[in-house]
Image (cartoon, rainbow, N blue to C red):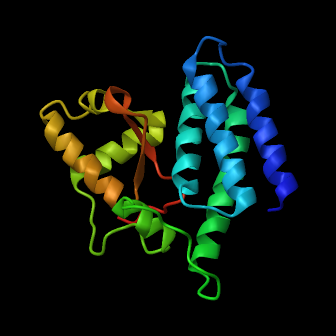
Amino acid sequence: MNKDNFLKLASAVYKVLEFFPESDPLKNRAKDKALAITESLISADRTHLLEDVDILLGYLWIGKSQGWLSSANYFIIDSEYEKIKKEILAIASDRSLPPVAVTDEPKEETVRVLRNTELKTPNFSLSGRQKKILEFLAKYEQAQVMDLQTILPDVTKRTIRRDLDQLLEAGKIVRLGDFNQISYKINESQIFIN
């Protein structure tokens, strides 16, 4: 992908963000992330790029679920950013190029992604609860812990969170949001192996 395409993609994000309410802080956060991603792509400093892309896509998903962004526009932008992520991972795995810069103490998950190691843990097999969680996410696209309690009524929140953590570690799902607004969705770049 060349610099012109980066700029076109950022411009497309800015255009769809015009449909977000002016007073919603999500609009400015999404603009900031789109700009940071573009700057990272142009400058080749990809330290936080993958994380920034996931955060921006989370913001846009929220906009889609609020009805501010059409599903078609969301999926077009999502697929373009996913292509960028794949290119970055391919570059990072190419041994002839210098590794992607990592500053400070990165999260273990970020290091695994940057080194392009497998996201799923060896010998990982899904439990019955985890299969139900994945089926729910496939049907409803995104869920919070309290949503998952509806399909697992006899399971504690703590156990559901533990199952979600294992699915995250295995790369089956991704986490969106912060603090009490955390939700989960299927990691679309993963192929599920039972």
**Left of 10 or right of it: where is 183?**
left
Residue 188 in view in this figure? no
In the picture, measured across the screen, residue 4 lies left or right of residue 30, that is right
In this view, the residue farthest toward the bottom is 96
Residue 73's quadrant in the figure? top right
The reply to whether residue 85 is visible in this rendering is: yes
Residue at (48% x, 52% y) in the render:
187
Locate residue 99, reporting x and y percent: 56, 77
Residue 168 against residue 112 in the figure, above or below = above
Q: Is residue 34 left or right of residue 122?
A: right
Establish if 94 lies above or below 52.
below
Question: Residue 152 location in percent, x, y?
Answer: 21, 35
**Residue 86, image x and y in percent?**
63, 64
In the image shown, does 159 or 100 lie closer to the viewer? 100
Q: Quadrant of residue 184?
A: top left
Residue found 78% across the figure and 45% down from its top = 9
Indicate the quadrant containing the N terminus: top left, top right, bottom left or bottom right.
bottom right
Q: Residue 137 sits in which quadrant? A: top left
- Point out residue 194 in the picture as x, y percentages from the top left corner: 35, 64
- The residue lying at 63 percent from left, 74 percent from top is 90
For the point 38% across and 44% down, which residue is it? 135
In the visual, does 82 lie left or right of 146? right
